[in-house]
Image (cartoon, helix red, strand yellow):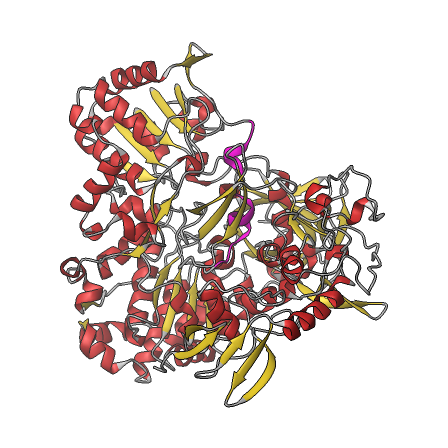
Amino acid sequence: MPDNIKFNIDNKEILAKPGQTILQAAMDQDIYIPYLCYYPKMKPQGSCRACMVEVTANGRTMTVASCTTPPMPDSEVVTNNEEIGKLRKDVIELLMAEHPHGCLTCHRIELCGPQDICQRHVSVTDRCTVCPKNERCELKDTVRSVELDLRTPLNYHRRNLPIHSDDPFYDRDYNLCIVCSRCVRVCDEIRFVNALTLTSRSGVSLVGTSNGSSLLESGCEFCGTCVDVCPTGALTERSYKWEKSNKDIKTICTNCPVGCSMIGEVNKLEKIIRFKGDLAGVPNEGQTCMRGKFGYDYPNHVNRLKKSYIRDKGILKKVEKEDLYKILSNTLSNYEPNEIGIITSPRGSNEDQYIISKFAKSVLKTTNLDSGLNIRNTLLSVMEDRFGIAGSTNNISSLENSKTFLVVNGNPTEEQNVLAVPLKKSIRNGSDLVVIDSRQTELTRLATLWLNPKPGTEILLVSAISRVIIDESLENQDFIINNVNGIEDYKRNIWKYDVSQISELSNIPEEDIRSAARILTQNDSLSILLGNDNLDDKDAYNLSNEVINLLLLTGFDENEGGLYPLYTGANTLGARNMGIIPNVDNFSINNISEKINNGDIKVLLIFADGIPTTKGPLYDSISDLSKLEFLFVSSPFDNSFTKVANVVSASTTYDEENATITNLERRVQSLNAARNPKFDQISTTNLLLGISENMGFSELSKYSKLDIFGDLVKNVPIYSLLTKDQVDNYGVKLPIDPSIKEAFPIFSKNIKMSLQNTHHNSSNTQNKDNMLFVPGRILASPENTYEIKKDKNNMNWVDNLNTISIHTSDAKNYNLNSGDNVTLFDDKNDEIVTGIISTDSDYRGIIRYTTLFGELATKMQKISDTDWAPEMDSLNYRQIKSIKINEKIIHAAD
């Protein structure tokens, strides 16, 4: 590894890391050099020239842009002298011609209000005091640092461009743009989306959308990264646009398992008013997604529950905390342990999950536990069985180093968005991607090879790829010899999979199956992103095992490659670590209706923060929840669950908790509170400790948050030796105890191949009279089969003209013709979609329909005044019951 470079900045000796520029080395030492076009994590561009410095090396003095120039050994760097100061002023004066600067160069700016009469005749629209980024504007800081004269030689001529406030979540005012191109470059270099681009207007460079005039059609992910990097008020969040931040807190996003490190800006009312990615955060390196950037605000909503209440003969009555504890303790004491079930919050901290597990097993004596978004329990269970751990086998950031990727039955660009960022970067740099999925997603458009199998044949397809690897001797012999047992038995078992027969069943050409095997084995750093979307438990079990077998054939190491489970729920993994693991036969979120109707479960406790209230297995059980003898719900809002509950507790939210979360890569990180609960909201821990005390379990009731953390470190093996200091410093990856680490098969090199007798009997197999709706969603459509229209609030929306693709024989069976305008209904008689028929589907029994991500963003924007993040639509298959043409409903012909 190259040595650090020693040089001087302003007579201070500096050590620069290999590959660093002068500016980066200076920033590491808190030495200020003005800059505008540079931004951490992006390629240096050197276009603004605000960072010019004087460098003396080998007897030669030169003026260079510090953001693009690496330091030379023993060189002398001067960041400011008379010559540099004049040059920097000239550069900034040129930039001032692109931005309102009457206030920026005025010494009275600190004394001036937005309604004061300006003696310099600066128009109201050009004043800093009416800019949404006033006091958090990088341009303002830069101008102040160079001390421009009151009058500048170049005048600013307002562009009179329209302010774009008609797309979801953020506003674009290009009158304030200095064309630093940060937003364009971050969208290209970091996000790999290219939704923004440099355009031209009357010969002047401007920033605009890369396709059309709306972000909805340009392929925007609405991740908000462009807003975070903008040095002016050109791009701003619409919510709390004019609010001033009083302090920043470091915390974690609780909307998905990636566990992004975030900076929360807090105002004087102790509300988090803005969320932005933390550049020092290990899982995300400053990146966010639509849910993380804009879905943080629900704790501030006016509809937050302020007090707990009970339902007494249909009448809602407020109840004090102590009375609530007594009611719950008295009720729970009247039931047998096996009659009580608990569903924990997917956002619940490790401490909350631990105390729930302890309360359930020590106080209630029940093992009926599950986490609210543990819908991919089988995937995590198989990983625990095969590897000993359920999280990813490598860091999220190490995806960037992989040379080959396989994505199976998952949609990470939407559901675990930031996880896909290093993957896309690696693909941009030339890596190969194979996708196995029947749905069209953004990753299928980036794939080297998209295997689009008939739904239900994914398991056989993976087995066929493994068969080709064995047939052509493509397996990683060294890895298998050193890490895998049972390979000979596995080889004998794999012969039963006939590649040509599976090709016919899956409708994937045999040559594509063989190509996939060759691509996946061409190097030793295969990373697999595995989901279980649209599979039942049996198929999920078989697919997970077959994919792990495939991974073991190709090999991986501790720094590159491995398996990344695509599950849901911010702390689903932490909940499992604390013992919140369902017994699938006895109790889980997937069989609650059955257990209630059988009389097995009579009491249910739901900790509902983060559980979807309009979709998912728990929502599907709403009608059965009302049959319970007693239902308790802890929730920040009234919702579909509280409407049928006997007792409701007003819960705290992430911004009122000091606790820990375990993310997808097994990294334990800190949640930090912005405030204390404002009203009578009760945290999960305080609630259970209060109930325990009333039930006579004084040992449990003495816990404090710190006691819980220490107790779980002592009693949960994988958390052994974990300290608070480690967690607070951007987290630590588990396990850290060497003796514990060696107990896991993946670390002890004792992994067994799993031999599965897989048969083609999937629940998704279709017959003539069953039609399956297979949705897809992409960022942009090159075919431009949509129109952007305005709603009554002048907001853009996508009028999707995409066709509904159906196989010719199915169209004949339903008496349909190309061009028919139809509406599809599912097996619950709910409307799925309306569109135009096209008889170009590739499979019988399958109807396809692909939409734009912008349609989803618009839908989320409309419900953004509540907790919308858990309600984002997933790409789930649906059984089609009927198809309506105009006013007539057509059922399948006999």
Rendered position, 468 above or below 736: below
The image shows residue 257 at horizontal and vertical percentages of: 40, 51
Rendered position, 841 above or below 337: below
Q: Quadrant of residue 667?
A: bottom left
The image shows residue 418 at horizontal and vertical percentages of: 48, 58
Q: Quadrant of residue 348?
A: top left
Q: Is residue 109 left or right of residue 295?
A: right
* Residue 628 appears anywhere in the view: no
* Residue 518 appears anywhere in the view: yes
Q: Total of numbered circles in the picture?
A: 0
Q: Quadrant of residue 518?
A: bottom left
Instruction: Between residue 698 and residue 847, name the one nearer to us.
Output: 698
> Which quarter of the image is occupied by the N terminus?
bottom left
The image shows residue 388 at horizontal and vertical percentages of: 22, 58
- Determine if the magenta segment contains residue 75: no
- Determine if the magenta segment contains residue 290: yes
The image shows residue 839 at horizontal and vertical percentages of: 66, 61
Which region shows up in magenta? 286-302
Instruction: Between residue 837 and residue 114, name the one nearer to us.
Output: 114
